[in-house]
Image (spheres, grey):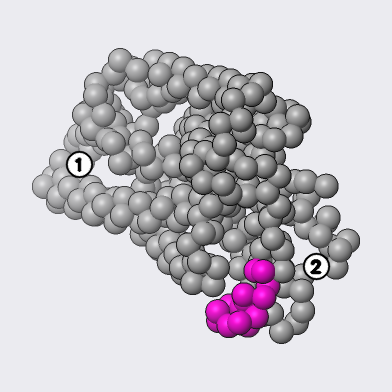
Amino acid sequence: MSFPFGIPEINQRIITNSNDMSSLTGSSSSSLSRDSWQPVMTANTATPSYWLNWRFLICFIWVLTAMVFASTLISKHEGPRGKPRRGGARRENQEEREAAGMLYADEVWKPCVKGVHPGWLLAFRAIAFFVLLVLLVLNVHVDGGDIFFFYTQWTFTLVTIYFGLGSVLSIYGCFQYQDEESRADHRVNSGEFDAERGTGAKHMGSNQEHNTRRIAGFWGYLFQIIFQMSAGAVMLTDCVFWFIIVPFLAIKDYRFNFLIVYMHSINAVFLLGDTALNCLRFPWFRIAYFFLWTAVYVIFQWIVHACVALWWPYPFLDLSTPLAPLWYSSVALMHIPCYGIFVLIMKLKHFLFSKWFPHSYQCVVH
């Protein structure tokens, strides 16, 4: 029985006896554990006959179709759509419906509840980045650089980059927040909110702040895109691991080492924690980046295997079987429910936080 996104990768690092926990230190038992399973090459992937056939043609059409569909979604919805260019100020009519691709600069670093200092979000992101980076380095040390042959490590690395970039943006946000607080204190101390015109000045100041919010620049949009791309990829890898692979291997009485368990859980935990705290949006159209992420991984595998005769990291990628087109299309369709799970999580967040913090919740609901 073959499963996508997991079986070969796990079998390379399964612990089959209690002494194999020493694999975390890179001892010889680690080598024995890795060598306990060898992928099977069903055909020579470096020959023209492997690629010049109807199976590859259909799979290529699936991947190309997904990429064209994703590119169309991005070109149609991404960005402020005709509003001032990114990084510039935007004055908007409050009754105007914002574009699905709109993102303001302060949304990448401010918490979703007013009054919460952005330093708390910074602390969470910094801790998550440190933990994920340590686990990634440890994984490379134990299993070598060939772990990046697998989709799981691609996704784990992407989540690590997300928290690293998020930490930098949050640091910038803390300085911005401090500047805004200082300006507010200065206005109060300068008598702008005196007894005669205090209410009117406050109202005008609030409207001015809303109308001149700055649209996010390149790094802000990149951060938002990585967030939504990571959300779908993490749901895909972790759901397949915990709901398909683990029950299957439990029947075989396999036990998993520290890295296998944490690589398929801690990334989701941190991402869900950040989701609960942040003020980022989650429009449906950015599923396009999730499709592109997987498509790039597949094309990378094709290029590598066309140049070198090599085993496939996941059985569904093997083009030698007549079921290959079915596998490719099935995995593509799996992206929709996996991304949809996170959409439902976001809707649940909006529902609960709107009830718990009716006057201070500030996330945009799509």
- Residue 254's disc number: 2
Please, is residue 236 above or below residue 271 in the view? above
Q: Residue at x 54, y 59 (%)?
A: 147
| Residue tagged 1 | 193
Viewer-proximal residue among 366 and 57: 57
Left or right: where 129 falls relative to 251: left
Q: Amino acid at mark 1?
A: Phe
Magenta segment's dominant SS is helix
Sort mark 1 into few (<14), some (14-19) or many (20+) by Cα contacts within 10 Å.
some
Image check: 21 left or right of 177? right
Q: Which residues are magenta?
A: 21-35
The Cα–Cα distance between marks 2 and 1, rounded to whole angstroms, is 69 Å
| Residue 246 rendering spot, x and y as whole percentages | 78, 57
- Residue 107 seen in the figure: no
**Looking at the picture, how far across and down is residue 118, in whole percent?**
36, 54
The answer to which of 340 and 5 lies nearer the viewer is 5
Above or below: residue 331 compared with residue 245: above
